[in-house]
Image (cartoon, grey):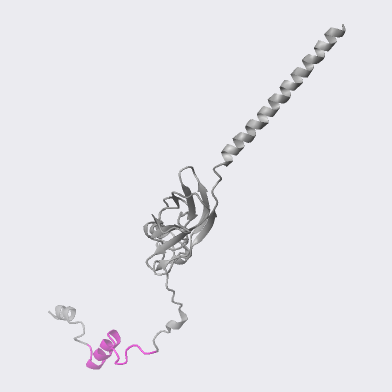
Amino acid sequence: NITSNRMTNPTGDLPLPLLIICLVSINPLPTASGVTGKPPDLSEYDVYEDTVTPSGLVPVSQQVIQRCDYDPCREDQTPCLTLSAVTGCSCPGFTLDSDIPEAPKLKSVSYNGSGVVVRWCAPYSQVTTYVVAVEGREDELVLEETRRSGIVQDMDHRAKVCVFAVNSAGKSDGSCMMYRPVDSWLPLTSGLIGGAVGLLLLLLLVGLLWRRRRQKDMETRNV
């Protein structure tokens, strides 16, 4: 019994002061102050903000915007601003419908056998219609924005031809050129001159042949 009591309570035979000292040395009491000292200084560490760019995207500053495939002189050309809205291309220098359009560039005025063909290039402006006018005539030729040419009928005299660009803001200045009709007598005159030259050559040839034959006849008589 004595042995079992010692095993179950090994501290039972120790004096009380010694027992308290052992307990204190084995389980020290926590202090109220806890951990003392300054908090760690994080200023020594550099903080970096990593900027991640998605692999499939290009920053806006590095994107190259292509110019629209636009030819201002091409017949039935799709307007540049329409191309820009569909494909995202650029139309540098184009003015909007709120501004009066610039004047188109008149290229040629010529007769094609049935009428006077007027050709021009579009301005770098938003246009709704083109107007072709002839000096001294009240009637005007109104054409769609995609057109770059028009035919004026019944022009047999010299006159100034102008083309204008129009939109909701107003009408542009005119781009003009003088039409000079070809003289209708010129083909006939050229034919008469050509016929006269041919007849003259024929007469010269006949004269040379006659002269040569005459010389042969004279030589035969002398023999």
Left or right side of 97 for 177 = right
Q: Could you say which is closer to the camera, residue 147 or residue 201?
A: 201
Q: Kindly identify the residue that appears in the image at 69 percent across and 28 percent down.
A: 200
Quadrant in the picture for residue 166: bottom left
Rendered location of residue 76, percent (x, y): 41, 50
Give percent across and percent down for residue 128. 38, 60
User: Residue at the location (44% across, 63% down)?
Assistant: 125
Front position in the image: 42 or 80: 80
- The image shows residue 119 at horizontal and vertical percentages of 49, 52
**Quadrant of the rendered structure where residue 209 is?**
top right
Q: Can residue 90 be seen in this view?
A: no
Q: Residue at x 82, y 15 (%)?
A: 215
Asked if the magenta segment contains residue 22, the reply would be yes
In this rendering, the answer to whether 89 lies above or below 117 is below
Is residue 91 or residue 106 the one in the foreground? 106
Q: Is 45 located above or below residue 16 in the figure?
A: above
What residue span does the magenta drawing correspond to? 14-37
